[in-house]
Image (tube, coloured by chain):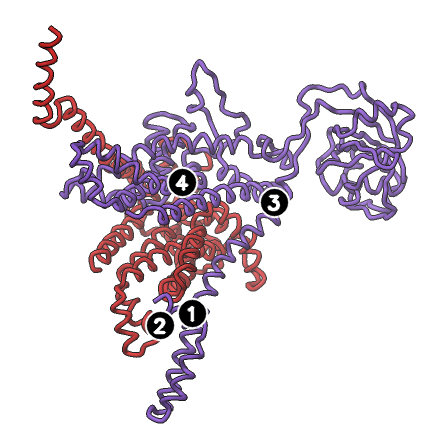
Amino acid sequence: MAIESAEKAGPKRYQRARQGISTRQRVTEGAIEWALFLAGASSIAITVGVLSVLIYESAGFFAHVSVWEFLTGTQWFPQFDPPKFGILPLICGTLVTTAVALSVAIPVGTIIAIYLSEYAPHRLRNILKPVLELLSAVPTVVYGFFALSFVTPFLQLFIPGLPGFNMLGPGLVMGVMIIPYVSSLSEDAMHAVPMTMREGSYGMGATKMQTAWRVVFPSALSGITAAYILGISRALGETMIVALAAGLEPTLTMDPRQPAATITAYIVQVSGGDLPHGSIGYQSIFAAGLVLLLMTLVFNVWGYRLRKRYREIY
Amino acid sequence: MVADNQSNSKNPDSVPAAPSATYSAGISPEIIAGLHRRKRWDRAFSTCGFLLVMGALSVLAMLFGQLVYEGGGRLFRGHFVNDEGFSPKINEIAGILQHSGDDFASNWELAQRPLTIANASERLTAEELTSLIGKKVIVDGDVPSTGLSEMESNTIAASDEESPKKYSKVSLHGTLSQSGGSWVVTPSPLAILPAEGQPLDKSWVGNQVAVGFGLAKSLPLKTKSIEKLSFQNFFASKPSSKAEEAGILTALVGSVLVVVVTMCLAIPLGIAAGVWLEEYAKKNWLTALIEINIANLAGVPSIVWGLMALGIFVYFLDLGRSILTAGLTLGLLVLPIVIMATREAIRTIPSHIREASYACGATKWQTVRHHVIPYSMGGILTGTIIGLSRAIGETAPLITIGALTFVTSLPAFSWSNPFAWLNSGFTVMPIQIFGWVSRPQEDFRENAAAASIVLLALTLALNTTAIYFRNQLRKKIKW
């Protein structure tokens, strides 16, 4: 008996090896592939979840407030009776703080990127780049506290009459926070420019600075633009810095020295309180969030396209 | 290129000097001058770049400096908690506290100086006093408030109006020690507290004690030996409506628990999605859609995640404003970071590793499990740590789900229901800081700064670890 079974087992095992993997293994493989696919596809479910919540709650909001009034109104007073929901003041606050931030982050970030990519010795670059990235790792609530307790009082020394809450201080701090986003991605793009192009420029007698600005920068422009766009999208969505230091009063002003609320600050202010579920105030934060998401989405898609392109060129 | 760089930046004068000497005969002076000018610009630009890098980093230094300046001291202060009712009668001794200084300054520093107990042994034997050395004692004193009017009337008048008594009660916490034959009470930081019912005001107490000593030079004070009294520092204290008694215990615990939930969601899901995209996904429209979708999710403002969580987790799934909700929210927020890190890490593995595995008869999953995932683990870990630091510092989405509440109790844990803590309310470090900053009282600013130091130190430490890992990996792995 024992001998017989052993004889049978021999060819069977051999057969199995010839067949390839066993059925059980095949099922396992298939199941695992499905599980992994589901994990990958979950990102789509998440996106659908985000969009459907925002759209569902906003639909309730727009049943009371017309879209036109919402997008063109210049007064945002949700607590008034009747409430006024014109989002322009919030958008204006968002754009002004973003503009202040970018006026710091884009020049400084670009020059830093050129310095790191073209001038800095290899070792120094490898140290400075990650250290600079720490700037964007600082929790934003800490930056907000810094803007409120240091930057604004400091600015008050130079700008008399600057209120304690203003858009300038948090904007500047936000700019510093965004520097690494701009500089790191721009540096990556410049680094990807082939050496032969630089060598051609040096061969014509150009200095490093001329090469950097007239050869490397234009060649890496799509990557650099992608970096700027990422910076813009960060600045638009930044919440805690402006919520803490820019004030919570919706004001339609282009003057960065004035206090004004941004879209994000409004959402924080409302959800920090206790609004009843389903009320119009509650729904208004979703409408505001939808506007914010669409604003950043445009920049994100644009930036993604540009990044893909510069990766393909070289 | 590198060598070229260094030689240029180190001896910038060598280049212009040489041509002017050698070629000046053939080349017009304008060209030489132009070369000089361009080189000067070049050097100026290089310096400018370096200065800007340093400037950006100095902001980080200023940030840290400001926080330490405002809240550094708070980290080391705390308050005494009388957890079991102690009886002051038991070890009551009487002594005379004498101020060691002669100066008449009425300030806080003065009140913090060591105090000598004169004629302590009249009530307590030397042995009994020796047994108290190193232990915490409370000194209850009656500081004469009459006669102070000429000195510090402005400061004290307010508190005396209500109770026009001769003495103000003050108690002092400190450690007893013996030096040079006399008994000395060294006040603990934030040691001098007014008796019950008095407002806690540093300057007032400081003035009271200092002025009192200044006037009387020596005054009777009762001492209690306190062993039941425990000192709670900033890290061990729960939130409180009094700034000096508030601490970050619940926030720290809450942060840890929320991050645990976050990581339980983000790590497995993120690695699985990353593996699928790199190893399994075919190049078709669905994959392209998922890729662009993940890139977009990474750019979604964090507050929008909070709105999503408010709509889905809090109201639709009815999970409440719990640790579970917060962890899931942050898990989704961190997910794109983990996916991207996983993909980057897997991409660096050369295909011959996989081919060798297949050649040995391994299936796809076996190859992934035994080769691809282990080899990319370092990169995944780096990305995960960065995601972790992001999750710890994230405030906005948690405020949106309504975490801005006053939580004084730690989540309860019991073996019968080991996951009950998931449903309990919570507070986390950034929320605690936000709450303190937005309070109107100035005192809480110091707490906010101190908590910011802790949070900043945590995130910077995590990021530095990630950088270190990344560098080690770059050095070690050579396929």
Judging from the image, mark 2 belongs to the subunit labelled A
Q: Tell me, for residue A159, which label it has, or none.
A: none
Chain for colour red = A
Judging from the image, mark 3 belongs to the subunit labelled B
- The amino acid beneath tag 2 is Lys
Query: Mark 2 = which residue?
Result: A208
Mark pair 3, 2: CA separation: 46 Å
Quarter of the image where the N terminus of chain A is located: top left
- The amino acid beneath tag 1 is Ser
**Which one is in front in this view, the residue at disc 3 or the one at disc 2?**
2
The answer to whether the residue labelled 1 contacts the one labelled 2, judged by CB atoms less than 8 Å apart, is yes
Mark 1 burial class by Cα count in 10 Å: few <14, some 14-19, many 20+? many
Query: Mark 1 = which residue?
Result: B46
Say which of B463 and B315 sits in front: B463
Mark pair 4, 2: CA separation: 37 Å
- The amino acid beneath tag 4 is Ile
Indicate the colour of chain B.
purple
- The amino acid beneath tag 3 is Gly
Mark 2 burial class by Cα count in 10 Å: few <14, some 14-19, many 20+? many
Local secondary structure at mark 4: helix
Say left or right for B49 vs B207.
Answer: left
**Which one is in front in this view, the residue at disc 4 or the one at disc 3?**
4
Q: Residue at x 38, y 41 (%)?
A: B387
